[in-house]
Image (cartoon, grey):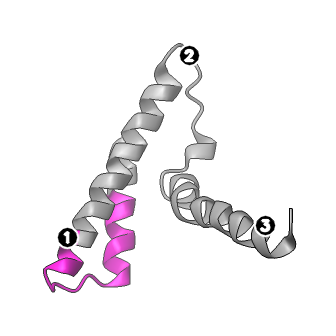
Amino acid sequence: MLPHLLGPIIRSRWAIENSLHWVLDMIFREDECRVRADHAPANFATIRHMAYNLIRNTLVHLAESGDSVPRWGERLKMYWLSRLVV
């Protein structure tokens, strides 16, 4: 494959890693979760994704409505939610 075609594909893959997976790893501490039995890992992953989407959609809604959400406010909401989920 030609480099100028391969570059955007690789960058788009890293965009996913840097957005979703970073949040799951750093905010929800997904890598540190020691849940291993039965269906629990899949259940916890589903709950984390739902929580992430809920916060993201709320922040998008606030931004679209013209309300400003400071950066520290976003981090604080993520922290609160991570304490509830984990």
In x, y percent, where is residue 39? Answer: 49, 17
- Residue at screen point 66% across, 60% down: 13
- Hey, what amino acid is under mark 3? Leu
Number of numbered discs on residues: 3
Q: From mark 3 to mark 2, how far is it between C-alphas?
A: 39 Å
Q: Which of the 4 image quarters holds residue 5?
A: bottom right
6 left or right of 76? right
Q: Is residue 40 above or below residue 12?
A: above
Q: Residue 37 has which mark?
A: 2
9 left or right of 26? right
Mark 2 is surrounded, within 10 Å at the Cα level, by few (under 14), some (14 to 19) or many (20 or more) other residues, namely few
- Residue at screen point 31% across, 85% down: 70
- Residue at screen point 37% across, 82% down: 71
Residue farthest to the left, as pictured: 65
Q: Which of the 4 image quarters holds residue 62?
A: bottom left
Q: Nearer the viewer, mark 1 or mark 3?
A: 3
Q: Residue 61 has which mark?
A: 1
Q: From mark 1 to mark 3, how far is it between C-alphas?
A: 34 Å
